[in-house]
Image (spheres, coloured by chain):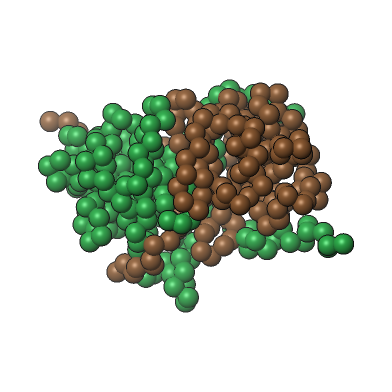
Chain colours: A green, B brown
Amino acid sequence: MKKSLGAKTILYPTPIMLVGTYDADGKPNVMTAAWGGICCSSPPCVAVSLRKATHSHGSIVLQRAFTVSVPSEKHAAAADYCGIVSGKRTDKFAEAGLTAVRSVLVNAPYVGEFPLVLECRLLHQIELGLHTQFVGEILDVKAESDILDANGVVDVEKLQPLFFAPESSAYYGTGRRLGDAFSMGKALKKKGP
Amino acid sequence: MKKSLGAKTILYPTPIMLVGTYDADGKPNVMTAAWGGICCSSPPCVAVSLRKATHSHGSIVLQRAFTVSVPSEKHAAAADYCGIVSGKRTDKFAEAGLTAVRSVLVNAPYVGEFPLVLECRLLHQIELGLHTQFVGEILDVKAESDILDANGVVDVEKLQPLFFAPESSAYYGTGRRLGDAFSMGKALKKKGP
């Protein structure tokens, strides 16, 4: 029996994306966002939604560039910190003990300590209401060598990504591998006539 | 040391969203998508990106409505199946042993067996390239009683959501609870002057 929970932003999982920007003074800033995700395969694009009131919002509009740094479980506290203070008056990189690394592709910094980074140039700015959705073209993805498998593919068990749970407001880690995508459903496929 | 992986759609986690629609003949269809996520808090909105070639794409454009059904770990094979066959020639609900339940709020069906459902009316259709992004206003979220805690909030450990890992093409379950959001980073916060 299903129960109505109302018109709310409830979905699991939502990603933890640390959005890196330079502000008008060239100061690096980073903000934690969970509203967003991959939104197109070609060109490869990622969407992040930010409230207009945030310092990062103005920086993306100004620089037309941003990065997305993806934390591991061990970075959960640092990622949370970057979502609860404003970059207007704080040097979040310094206070969280994180290193701002300048992207060589776009005018934006990323988190040096985090194992996975997406470097993006702004393609679209879409006003949805409280949030503005920024769609960035992914120009490159960079990963620490120690999270890659023998084929150079990200090993999710080494990355150990976390997710944000809306409503209950908690972070969860990565669980067990359930199976291969585009494969484990084949058993349900009927033979053709 | 970070290594370049190229311009690719790599992000973890990405959600497993079963997008429910009625086609022009009123036939219910459901398609698995991982490109998307929550994109605005007010109005509450969710984005799903679909290729124009899919049967579901035309149905959303026609009906201006869709649902998102969220599976638990035990539904992984059914969710995978709905991503590898087309609804043009197949009744995916019947073949996957799933029940199409008609939403009373929008002209779209959802998956009766799945524990969490978002009912959406189409707000925006944004052409990004290979994918069209559909932004839906979430009119209601419905959840099975047995995944709710004593306060009526979704218990993530009971829901057991899964995620899709691009590149390695695998599904992963939910791991351990790491801590409270908007809280575990407070220890890093400097005292004011």
Picture quarter containing residue B136? top right
Residue A82 sits above or below residue A53 on the image: below
- Residue A173, percent across and down? 49, 50
Residue at point 31%, 67% (across, down): B2
Residue A156 relative to residue B144: left or right: left
Given residues B81 and B176, the one toward you in this image is B81
Q: Residue furthest bottom?
A: A150
In the picture, the quarter occupied by the N terminus of chain B is bottom left
Given residues A7 and B94, the one toward you in this image is B94
Picture quarter containing residue B109? top right
Residue at point 39%, 62% (across, down): B7
- Residue A76, percent across and down? 38, 47
Q: Is residue B54 visible?
A: yes
Given residues B155 and B88, the one toward you in this image is B88
Residue A115 sits above or below residue B62 on the image: below
Count every numbered label the image shows and give the total. Answer: 0
In the picture, the quarter occupied by the C terminus of chain B is top left
Residue at point 49%, 61% (across, down): A156
- Residue A45, percent across and down? 42, 52
Residue B132 sits above or below residue A50 on the image: below
Residue at point 51%, 45% (across, down): B132
Residue B32 relative to residue B128: left or right: right
- Residue A50, percent across and down? 35, 36
